[in-house]
Amino acid sequence: MFKVKKYKEVHKNEKYLVTFERILQCKYAKYFGISFAIIIVFVVWAFSKAYFNDRSQKVFENHVNESLNSIELRIQKYENALRSGVGFLQGSDYVSRDEWYHFIQTLDPEKYYPGIQGIGFSMMLLPDEVGKIEDQMHSNGDQSFVLKPKGERKQYSAILYLEPLDRRNRSAIGYDMFSEPLRKEAMERARDTGLATISGKVKLIQEIDSDVQAGFLMYLPYYKADKKIDTIEERRKSLVGFVYSPFRMNDLMKRIGSNDDSLRYEIYDGEKRSENNLLYDSFKPSSYISNHESHRTISIGGRNWHIYYASSPEFDAVNSSDYPLLIAISGLILYFFLLYIILELVRSRKMLQIKSEEVKESEKFYRTIFSSVHEAILILEHHTVVDCNDLALSLFNISREELMGKDIFSLPYAIESREQNFHDSIDLAYKGEYITIESSLHLKNSPEEIKIVEFTLSGFMQNDENNLVMVARDITSQVEEERIYRMQMRQAQMGEMISMIAHQWRQPLAIINAITSRMRLEVMLSGEEDAFSDNLIKIEEQSTHLSQTISAYRDFFRPDKPKEYFDISILVYNAISLMDYMLKNNGIMIETVLKHNSNLLTYRNEILQVLIVLLKNALDAFVDKEIINGEIIITLDRDNDYCIIRISDNAGGIAPEVINKLFIPYFTTKTKNNGTGLGLYMSKMIIQDHCNGYLEVESKNNEAIFTIKLPL
């Protein structure tokens, strides 16, 4: 069928081939073709070159953005580390060098803040406080501590702690950063704003060897915890010092993770692009001119860094502009190849006309066969319905427009299968297996209309994993007939067996009753009635109960089903008698509430069968959920038109997603070996189709309530 569609499409293009053939017959056609090819090649080359240049620029900009984000995120992370230091200081009246050491060890800068030279604390001092701090540091074990540089100033700062205390950082202990203008400017900005700030380009005190790098410092002010800091004056009066970090720029950029082989860049502190402002330069001496450049500015700690990016030779090589030429040449080759194909198509036009006629005949034959089959047929392609016959429309009760092109699982019908999931069956059929499966078909929003369908699933043709033939046959009446036949056969067999048991048991039971009656009479005549007499009475009662139970089983398995006139309360009692042992054995109490009794003319045995199914389901629910003190209440009532039987249990109720599926064939909440999914479905058919009544279910207050309504 799909080959048929393909030929139809070719047939539609026939008129275009005729027109093209006439054009080719023109003597100037070959010159026109060559000229057109040259124009096409030039246009393709120009557009592709512009496209690749634009694409390369966008890729370059993406690398630039990633680099900027990496720098900004890492600086923010360093600022968070300083904030944790301020919080640590504010949590104590005094922090010793050892406590600061252990705090920094906990932060583990080498692992979690790579690129940072250290984290330290610098205290602001008045002239008369310098000596006290030096004495205090000496008494704490740092005998070499001295404020540097020497000299008289209005205000000092002293680096008291700096961890990790390696060779470089040790040289900075005691240094007065407030004495150097660039550092002082950053510290004053931090003091007055309360924000983290960075300094301009400086040479760090830690530069003690030949590998001298540009550096900068980040400051975060530490104020007295009990003071207000809403205004600049309040901040200045409350300032204690700064938690700060020094950075060596080359070390920072190597560890910051922003090095990208695609980029070369320079970082300047300030707008002027000069050696004095240069913080970092990844350019290597070379005469190479980059294809892409970009200038970005980022604000960090109150200062503007100007970053000049350029593409690397590696990036330009990967994004080489040779591609447009290759595309143009490839386009030229493709053009001549397509031209050759078109010429071949023109030469084959007559053959296509013949094929078109064959296709018409083939399609006509296919449609005849497809419509004459007396079963519903659907053709699926990737679960989508691409064709069907009229019987399929009748089966699904849907129009062709509503069915064609729809996913089989998106239709307003639910399909429940007994053996395995219907979706899994279709997947197996796509893989080449031949599948036959019985399923129920019903409207998703109206489970009352149910059909039992036998689906046969197979691949459309050999080695075709995309297409599937689905043949569907409505077997609802057949299943019902088989059910009735099996039930009658089973009841006939069981009836014969029960009759034999009744025949064999009745005489011994009668003898037992006669003996116990005579013994009880002798006891009464002797005038010595005691516990022995009570036990004789119990024996008589149990013998009578056993005889009545045998009669109930014999009546239940009668193969004939005539309508009978009977007392509904007696029928309920018979159902309880048949289930009495199993219920009591599982500790389940059963209570009968008789509000109004009724006499009915209907199929007695089938009503009895439904009652036993409902009681058995309640028993299974108690057992599965391991409920203790289970209780079943059977209420008999009536209204003007119906006798009403309500059976409720306290087994926890029925889940909302299950209750609407209870009467669907093959749907079961039990395991495969413990349930067929047909019990409640057949019960509903008995009550509604055979007895003209209703079988309904509801769940509330952790109770499941089944209601049977039978016409009076």
Image (cartoon, rainbow, N blue to C red):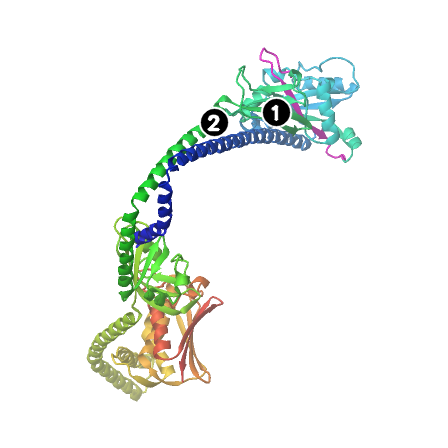
Query: Whole-percent x and y of residue 536?
Result: 30, 81
Q: Which mark is residue 677?
A: none
Q: Amino acid at mark 1?
A: Ile
Q: How far is disc 2 from disc 1 in space, using C-alphas?
A: 26 Å
Work out which quarter of the rendered image holds the N terminus and state it. Answer: bottom left
Q: Which label's residue is closer to the chain start, 2 or 1?
A: 1
Query: Dividing the picture into quarters, in which one does residue 643 lie?
Result: bottom left
Work out which quarter of the rendered image holds the C terminus and state it. Answer: bottom left
Q: Is residue 111 magenta?
A: no
Query: Whole-percent x and y of residue 510?
Result: 23, 83
Query: Whole-percent x and y of residue 314?
Result: 48, 23
Q: On the image, numbered disc 1 is attached to which residue?
A: 307
Determine whether, in the image, residue 318 is placed left or right of residue 199.
Answer: left
- Please say if 676 is above or below 323: below
Q: On the image, numbered disc 2 is attached to which residue?
A: 321
Helix, strand or loop at label 1? It is: strand
Span of residues in magenta: 204-229
Determine whether, in the image, residue 171 is placed left or right of residue 475.
Answer: right
Query: Dividing the picture into quarters, in which one does residue 524 lie?
Result: bottom left
CA neighbours of label 1 inside 10 A, class few (<14), some (14 to 19), many (20+): many
Instruction: Tell me which residue sits at (76%, 13%) in the image.
Output: 151
Helix, strand or loop at label 2? It is: loop
Of badges 2 and 1, nearer the viewer stands: 2
- Closest to the observer: 426 or 689? 426
CA neighbours of label 2 inside 10 A, class few (<14), some (14 to 19), many (20+): some
- Closest to the observer: 697 or 294? 294
Examine the rendering and report whether any part of residue 669 can be seen.
no
Q: Amino acid at mark 2?
A: Ser
Query: Whole-percent x and y of residue 494?
Result: 23, 74
Instruction: Tell me which residue sits at (78%, 14%) in the image.
Output: 152
- Please say if 473 is above or below 156: below
